[in-house]
Amino acid sequence: MAELKTKPTKADVEKFLKGIKDEKKREDSFKILKLMKQITKEEPAMWGSSIIGFGNYHYKYASGREGDWFLAGFSPRKQSLTIYAMTYLEKHKDILKRLGKHKIGKGCLYINKLEDVDMKVLKELITTTVKKLK
């Protein structure tokens, strides 16, 4: 069974975020950092070279595949801010309808900039997914 390549590192989260060239993306990233820290009550850690994760979660699928991941996380990708959750986001259609401009994958939420979404609804979504994992 393949092992996950993305794992926690000792890299400095603030240094990584300060290195983001796009000022708006850097500013939004620090806001998400603060929000996730508040919701998870966990310290951030770099996972791989570009993902910031909070807390730990051990998962095991019916197939037998298992591993460790973070409770909540994000990455300031070039295209969009990517917010990671371990629950399937399509199960939260009621919250997503109120969020604002976004796209979703199975466990990822893609936002171009924070001003495109309602921050209270984003907080509700992240809080809901974290509670399901705890």
Image: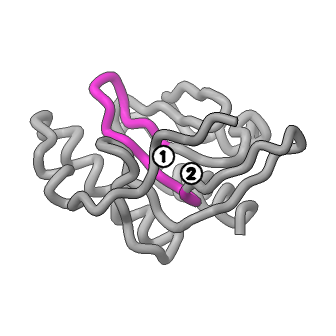
Measured as percent of width and height from the top left, residue 51 is found at: 38, 46
Q: Are marks 2 and 1 in contact (CB under 8 Å)?
A: yes
Q: Is residue 13 visible?
A: no
Measured as percent of width and height from the top left, residue 107 is found at: 63, 37
Is 1 rendered above or below residue 14?
Answer: above
Q: Is residue 79 left or right of residue 1?
A: left
Q: Is residue 10 left or right of residue 131?
A: left
Residue 82 falls within the magenta-colored stretch = yes
User: To which quarter of the image does residue 79 belong?
Assistant: top left
* Amino acid type indicated by mark 2: Val
User: To which quarter of the image does residue 4 belong?
Assistant: top right
For the point 48% across and 40% down, which residue is it?
5
Task: Name the residue carrying label 1.
Answer: 118
Measured as percent of width and height from the top left, residue 14 is found at: 19, 60
Number of the label disc, if any, that sits on residue 121: 2
* On-image quarter of the N terminus: top right
Number of the label disc, if any, that sits on residue 107: none
Residue 127 falls within the magenta-colored stretch = no
Dot 1: few (<14), some (14–19), or many (≥20) neighbours within 10 Å? some
